[in-house]
Amino acid sequence: MKQDYYAVIFTSLLSETTEGYQETAIAMEKLAKQQPGFLGIESARDSLGITVSYWESLEAIKNWKANLDHLKVQETGKTKWYQWYKVRICKVERAYEFFADEF
Amino acid sequence: MKQDYYAVIFTSLLSETTEGYQETAIAMEKLAKQQPGFLGIESARDSLGITVSYWESLEAIKNWKANLDHLKVQETGKTKWYQWYKVRICKVERAYEFFADEF
């Protein structure tokens, strides 16, 4: 039987103060990957930014949210980088994948 | 009590044949918005594309997937536009939102 897993959908609009944002985003992605229960991360940004991270359990998500280095960055995000963001914590109920033949 | 809702996370890599893709993506977003049970859609693309659509129920998602115009486009997507994609159907369990004061 397939193990359930969870997705955190983080959708954001940056403010005009983006100094330090890019380096910190890279560092946080690296740190997330080291957390227990981390499964994967996908990111894209044009006007809107969407980052989806995948986790083994709600507890793993809670622990990552409470990570001290991550908490500091969340604070800077609120006071400096983000105009708006929304976080949705989701249970992945079903998934399917397509690969083109020629790749 | 808050009503449950669902998210479809569509992550994709385009092939090198992107002719007609952009117009069709816009048309499909417009069509999705007209479906019963549609709640919202968010998209971003740089190297990876992520589109998340939100729906009232699993039935609404199933109906949208089976929509005839959408089915034709899904077929073109597989034969032409996409190198890879993954679809995850998720139940949104919790959500929170941040707005900066100055905006």
Image (tube, coloured by chain):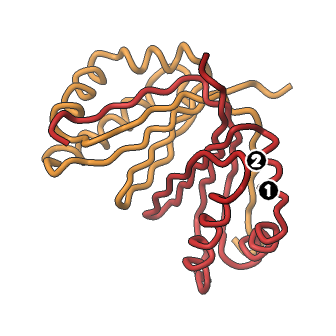
Chain colours: A orange, B red
Instruction: Read off the residue under disc 2.
Output: B61
The reply, left or right, for residue A89 in relation to residue B91 is left
Instruction: Read off the residue under disc 1.
Output: B65
Q: Vertical placement of B76 versus B33: above or below?
A: below
Could you say whether the residue bearing mark 2 is in a helix, strand or loop? helix
Could you say whether the residue bearing mark 1 is in a helix, strand or loop? helix
Which disc is residue A98 wearing?
A: none
Q: Residues within 10 Å of mark 2 (few under 14, many from 20)?
A: many
Name the residue rendered at 39%, 56% in the picture: A45
The answer to whether the residues at label 1 and label 2 have Cβ atoms under 8 Å apart is: yes
Name the residue rendered at 37%, 14% in the picture: A66
Chain holding disc 1 = B
**Quarter that holds the N terminus of chain A:** top right
| Cα–Cα gap, marks 1 and 2 | 6 Å
Query: Do marks 1 and 2 share a chain?
Result: yes
Q: Residue A102 at what x, y percent from top left?
A: 73, 75
Q: Residue A11 at what x, y percent from top left?
A: 42, 43
Amino acid type for the residue under numbered disc 2? Ile
Name the residue rendered at 73%, 62% in the picture: A99
Q: Residue A5 at what x, y percent from top left?
A: 66, 27
